[in-house]
Amino acid sequence: MRHLIKGLEADLTGFKCSFKTRKILEKLPNDLIDILNKIAQNNGGVWIVGGAVRDWLIGHTPEDIDLAVNLTPEQMLEIFPDAILTGENFGTLSLRGENCLYQATTLRTDGNYNDGRRPNNVFWGNSLKKDLERRDFTVNAMAIDVARELLYDPHNGRSDISRGLIRAVGNAHQRLSEDGLRIMRAFRFSDRKEDGVWELENSLEVSISQLKHMLDNISRERIFIEWKRILSGQSSGIVIKKMALMGILDRFLIGRWDNKFAIFEALDNNLSLFDGLEKFSLILCENTIQEVETICKELKMSKIERNRIISIHNRFGHIPKLNKHSIRRFRFVLQDFAIKHLMLEKIIIDCKISIRGEGLTNHNLIIIDEIIDAVKNLEKQKTQSEPLADGKWIMVQTGLQKGEKLGRLKSWLHTIQIERDLYDISQIEKVLSTLSWNNSDFKNWPELKFP
C-alpha cells in the first residue's frame, strides 16, 4: 500500500486492525488513497465508516466506501472543487474517484427529530465519538483510520457481528423514534447473504412492534428503496415472512399479511433464481390486478418497474400449449423470463396459491415440467426477430391501405413467422396465400403475445 499521511486523531480509543483487515486496506484503490491523503494534508481527520467496515469484518466486499471527515462542507469544497453536493443540509459531498464516487460526510450531531423522518437541524463537529453515537445500529457504527490501521468500535459492533445480532445504538425506542425508516433498514441488515439471517435484538424487535406505525410518515419512495434491497437479499424469503408476521407489510401494502400462509410457504422455496421485482410479483400473486396497480402507484415505482410487475402478475395461471408453435411463441415473447415464469407457476401450484383472488390454477406440475424441458430443448431460433413482411410489402401483396387492419395482418404474419421459424420472405408469401385475411374479422386475428 502507498504511504499514507496521518490526519487528525479520533477522540476514541482504537484497536489495531486485524491481519485480515490490514490486508484489505493494503488493496484500497489509488484514487481513494489520494483522497485520504489530501484531507490529511489539509489538517483534516478522515475515517472509513459504516457499511464498508461492517462488510469487511463480515467477510463481504462492500458496494460503496463512505468517509467521515471533521472538515466542513465548505472546507471540503476548497480541497475538492469538483465535488458534488449530494446532501448539503447534512454535510454530504460526493468526491470523484477514477471510476466511482466516494461519499464524504462532515462529523455531526443531530438536533431533535420532530417528524420521525429527519433531524430538524444538524451541527458540524470534530468528534467521531458523537458522530458514531447518532447512527442506527451497532454494526454500522464503526470506523477505520486507514493511515493508523485503527478500528473504532465504541458500541461493540464486532461482538454483534460474531453473534449474528442486529442491535440499535443506545436506546432502540429512541433510535426508531428518530427515523421510522430504520425499521426497514433493520430487516434489510438482518439478511447476511450466505451467513443466513441475523436475529433482531429483543429490545429492538419490541420497539419495532410498538413503532411500526411510524412507517406511515415515511415517503413511499424511501420505503420502496429499502424494500427493493430487502427483496434482492439472499435470504429475503425468511426476512419478508417475519416482516409480515410482525405487521410491517401492512403499513405499505394493501391487505392483511400476517395470515397469507400460502405466500409464506412460497417464500420457503429457494428463490435465488429470481430478482427482487420477480419475487415481489410472486408475493402479490393473491392480490387483484387493481390492488397491484394501486400498490405500484403508491410506492412511486418507475414506469418500467410498474409495467414489469403488472405484466408478470397478469401472466400468472397461464402456460403455453405443449407444441412447437406455442413453445416458440412463448419463448420469443418472454425471452429470458420464459423458464422463470414456468418455475413461478410450479411454486404457485405446489403452494396452492390463489391467483388474483380468482382461485387455484388447474395446471399440474408434470405438464409444466414437460413444457420446461421443451423450452430448454427447443432449437435455436433461425428467423430474425423483426417481421420479414413490413407494411409496404403487405400493401403491395394485398392492396390494403394504412390502418388497423394492415397492422393486424402484419402482426398475424409475424406470429406465424415466429411459430414456424420462417426465415425467408418467400415463405411468408406462401403463408399469406393460405390466410383468410380478406373475409374475416381482423379483430380476431392472432397476435404475437403471451398469453
Image: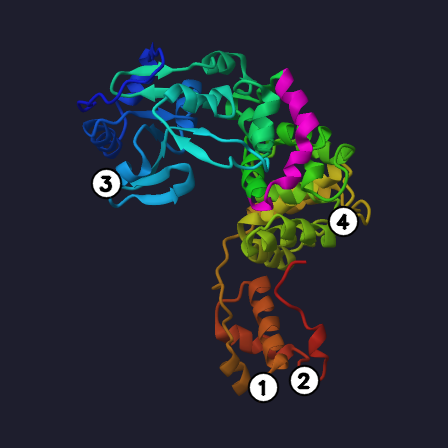
Q: Earlier in the sequence, mark 4 or mark 3?
A: 3
Q: Who's the residue at 58% across and 43% down the image? A: 224
Q: The residue under label 2 is which amino acid type?
A: Asn
* Contact between labelled residues 2 and 1, with CB atoms less than 8 Å apart: yes
Q: Position of residue 110 (x, y in %)?
A: 47, 30
Numbered badge on residue 78: 3
Q: Secondary structure at mark 3?
A: helix
CA gap between label 3 and label 1 equals 71 Å
- Find out whether residue 220 is within the magenta segment: yes
Disc 3 versus disc 2: nearer the observer: 3
CA gap between label 2 and label 4 equals 39 Å
Indicate whether 448 appears above or below 349: below
Q: Secondary structure at mark 1?
A: helix
Question: As drawn, which residue projects farthest toward the bottom?
Answer: 399
Q: State which quarter of the image contains the N terminus.
A: top left
Q: The residue under label 1 is which amino acid type?
A: Thr
Numbered badge on residue 398: 1
Q: Who's the residue at 55% across and 26% down the image? A: 191
CA gap between label 4 and label 3 equals 58 Å
Q: Position of residue 51 (x, y in %)?
A: 43, 27
**Camera-side residue of 408 and 74:** 74
Q: Taking 30 as reference, is 189 left or right?
A: right
* Magenta part of the chain: 202-221
For label 2, the residue is 438
Numbered badge on residue 268: none
Q: Position of residue 435 (x, y in %)?
A: 65, 77
* Contact between labelled residues 3 and 4, with CB atoms less than 8 Å apart: no
CA gap between label 1 and label 2 equals 9 Å
Disc 4 versus disc 3: nearer the observer: 3
